[in-house]
Image (tube, grey):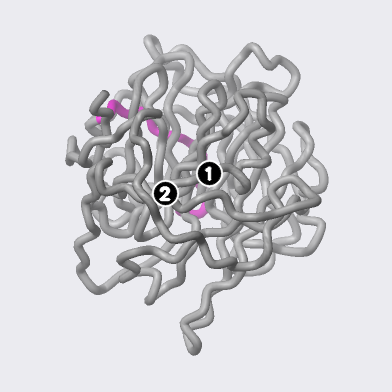
Amino acid sequence: MLVVTLAAVLPLVACSDSTETGSPSGGGTPGATSANPSPEEPRQPDCDSPCYGEAENVGTLGDDTVVEVSGMAGSVRTPGLYYVVGDEPGTSEVAVVRADGTLVAAIELAGMDTENAEALAVGPCGDDPDTSCLYVGDIGDHVGRDHVVVYRAPEPDLDDPPGSVDADALEYRYEDGPTDAEALLVDPDGRPLIVSKAPFDEDTGETGSTRLYRGPADGGELALLGEVAVPEPENGFLAGLVGNVVTDASADLAAGRVLLRTYDEVLEYRSPDPGADVATFPDWPSRRVPPGNVLQAETVAYVVGGCGYLTTSELTGSVDAVGCTD
């Protein structure tokens, strides 16, 4: 969660203005890179895989949805609908919304009682990779938590949404101590991948390293895989105030693509090999894509079964959609 008191207009960037950041160098452990490396000079992408258009505002999340949206993920079972969650303590449900933010249903996850839910993902279930599960990442940490929790529940039928579904509470501990995070991915084996929220030094204005962790499908230790090179933003207004930090992530496993959301930009990583482990995404070629005009952006979600993505404002609930031009 971030409180912003200054208004800002985030730039809209068409695909023709998107810039390639290149593949950060790394070696050894999957996804490992040196801390805060300098990215290559941006260059024009080929714009064919895919070419994104400008962001458009398509609606607003209502007050009956969540107070401060901190996580969003597209339904695999019911494409066109999205799960959202708020970061207030004691959260026990997720909301289901359309792309324009209108509420479809509120679903309780029986057994869920969050401290700081900051992320959502939909991915393969750990024991049944052919079934999709909803994952709620209770992974925000401002107090040095002993452990974090990922809640997992089989995706319900959203054509006839239930009032409640049972969820498993999967406890995790970082191998290198408490870590704040707001971004969650799930690999094909149902293992969570967590991208940390880098520390920010207000006195020096420097952002620390962003780290990538992976844990077992059913809870346990989160192993450090390496660091993620997050390039400095081209228009880093909020980065200068609160740091160049990752606030959400989304993966399209079939297409071999990953999105990282920061307060100022959206980065897309594209696999050069269709069979690549998603945990190696920090080493994939990446590019800046349209960030939308949403203040205090803490969500990004690929469109399932289509082309494009959504991003929302935690501050106002506005929803921007980025579609494809080809």
Residue 259 coordinates in the image, percent (x, y): 47, 42
Query: What residue is at 81 percent from the left and 57 percent from the top?
Result: 175
* Residue at point 27%, 39% (across, down): 64
Q: Is residue 200 above or below residue 137?
A: below
Residue matched to label 1: 285
Q: Is residue 119 above or below residue 104?
A: below
Residue 55 appears in which quarter of the rendering? top left
Bounds of the magenta span? 88-99
Along the viewing direction, whichever of 308 and 248 lies nearer the viewer = 308
> Residue flagged by tag 2: what amino acid is it?
Glu
Residue 91: % across, % down? 50, 45
Residue type at the position of mark 1: Pro
| Residue 92 among those drawn in magenta | yes
The verdict on residue 323 being magenta is no
Please, what secondary structure does the residue beneath circle 1 have?
loop
Whole-percent x and y of residue 275?
66, 24
Q: Quadrant of residue 181?
A: bottom right
Tell me whether circle 2 and circle 1 mark residues in contact (CB < 8 Å). Answer: yes
User: In the image shown, does 260 or 117 lie closer to the viewer?
Assistant: 260
Viewport quadrant of the N terminus = bottom left
Q: Which part of the image, by quadrant, shows the C terminus? A: top left
Q: Name the disc covering residue 20, or none.
A: 2
Q: Is residue 99 left or right of residue 217?
A: left
Taking depth in this image into account, of 284 and 162 the one nearest to the observer is 284
| Residues at marks 2 and 1, CA–CA distance in whole angstroms | 8 Å
